[in-house]
Image: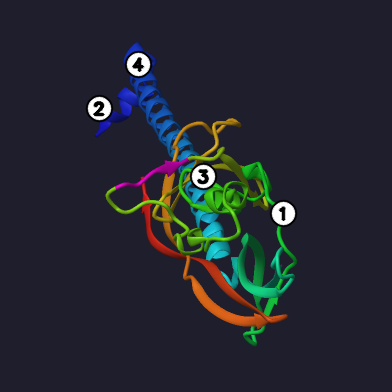
């Protein structure tokens, strides 16, 4: 014991070396603790950005799904009016007048309406929607009108090439062109959705859309390439079936028989998958 005390009180270099060794050990240990804390903070920051990217994509997906599933939809109505009249025919020899039945068919191509249903089940139908030429004016309506997947263009141009003496059988053509074996897909322009954040401003999400000729709408949501957060990209794909649900009716208007066909375009979720 006395030897240890003497060693500690000694002025020789051995005690100084031991003190320096202890100091080095403490310094290394402290550096390791600081390094570990810094790395943990960095991982937490990355996890936070990752969570923001994921929830931005998921929020955009659920928002659009809710909008398409809510009590609001598009209707399209087309008509065939059957007009019958007695046309007088005068005999050039006798001057006698006889009458001949003349039947004409007046076809009205589909007209679109927006329908909203309130909580009581009451329907509120808008005035006729204008035809659009850009997906930015209404992506769903733009795709429903597209000639690659629907018969709308064929119906719209029917009167340009047919006489009104024949029944317009285009009236009975379905809305969507294809079958499961002959699907045609159409891509309009991609769109951008902005998700608001309370602390980080805004997060941008890109949405690509396509619809095939059986009425399946596929929406793909992915983090935008803009901004500083270019890592940890997430993608979610939402598939929804567009049901046309045609309804037929007949009624009399001003003595004419009018056939109506109303399409009710509603969407039903088929799948929602992370890509």
Image-quadrant location for residue 128: bottom right
How many residues crowd around disc 1 within 10 Å: few (fewer than 14), some, or many (20 or more)?
few
Residue 130: mark: 1
- Magenta-colored stretch includes residue 13: no
Spatial separation of the CA atoms under disc 2 and disc 1: 103 Å
Q: Which residue is mark 2?
A: 3
Residue that appears at 36% across and 53% down: 273
Spatial separation of the CA atoms under disc 3 and disc 1: 17 Å
Q: Is residue 111 above or below residue 202?
A: below
Q: Is residue 198 above or below residue 36?
A: below
Residue that appears at 39% across and 15% down: 11
Q: What span is colored magenta in the figure? A: 182-186
Upstream in sequence: badge 2 or badge 4? 2
Q: Secondary structure at mark 2?
A: helix
The overriding secondary structure of the stretch rendered in magenta is: loop
Q: Where residue 140 sits: x, y (%)?
A: 57, 53
Q: In the rendered view of the protein, which quadrant contains the N terminus? A: top left
Residue 41: mark: none
Spatial separation of the CA atoms under disc 3 and disc 2: 102 Å
Q: Which residue is mark 4?
A: 17
Residue 147: mark: 3
In the figure, is residue 89 to the left or right of 193? right
Spatial separation of the CA atoms under disc 3 and disc 4: 88 Å
Image-quadrant location for residue 250: bottom right
Q: Where residue 7 sits: x, y (%)?
A: 31, 23
């Amino acid at each position: 014991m006395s030897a240890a005390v003497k060693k500690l009180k000694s002025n020789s270099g051995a005690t100084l070396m031991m003190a320096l060794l202890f100091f080095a050990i403490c310094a290394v240990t402290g550096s390791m603790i600081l390094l570990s804390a810094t790395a943990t903070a960095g991982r937490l920051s990355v996890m936070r950005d990752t969570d923001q990217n994921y929830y931005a994509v998921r929020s955009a997906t659920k928002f659009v799904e809710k909008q398409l599933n809510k009590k609001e939809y598009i209707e399209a109505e087309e008509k065939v009016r059957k007009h019958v009249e007695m046309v007088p025919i005068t005999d050039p020899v006798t001057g006698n007048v006889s009458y001949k039945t003349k039947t004409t068919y007046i076809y009205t191509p589909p007209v679109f309406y927006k329908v909203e249903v309130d909580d009581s089940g009451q329907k509120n139908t808008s005035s006729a929607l204008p035809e659009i030429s850009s997906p930015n004016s209404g992506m769903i309506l733009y795709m429903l009108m597209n000639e690659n997947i629907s018969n709308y263009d064929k119906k719209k141009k029917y009167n340009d090439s047919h006489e009104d003496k024949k029944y317009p059988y285009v009236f009975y053509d379905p809305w969507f062109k294809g079958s499961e074996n002959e699907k045609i897909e159409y891509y309009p322009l991609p769109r951008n959705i902005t998700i608001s954040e309370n602390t980080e401003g805004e997060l941008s999400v890109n949405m690509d859309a396509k619809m095939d000729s059986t009425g399946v709408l596929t929406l793909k949501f992915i983090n935008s390439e803009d901004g500083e957060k270019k890592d940890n990209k997430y993608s979610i794909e939402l598939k929804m079936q567009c049901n046309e649900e045609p309804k037929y009716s007949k009624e009399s208007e001003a003595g004419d028989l009018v056939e109506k066909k109303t399409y009710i375009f509603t969407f039903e979720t088929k799948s929602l998958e992370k890509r």
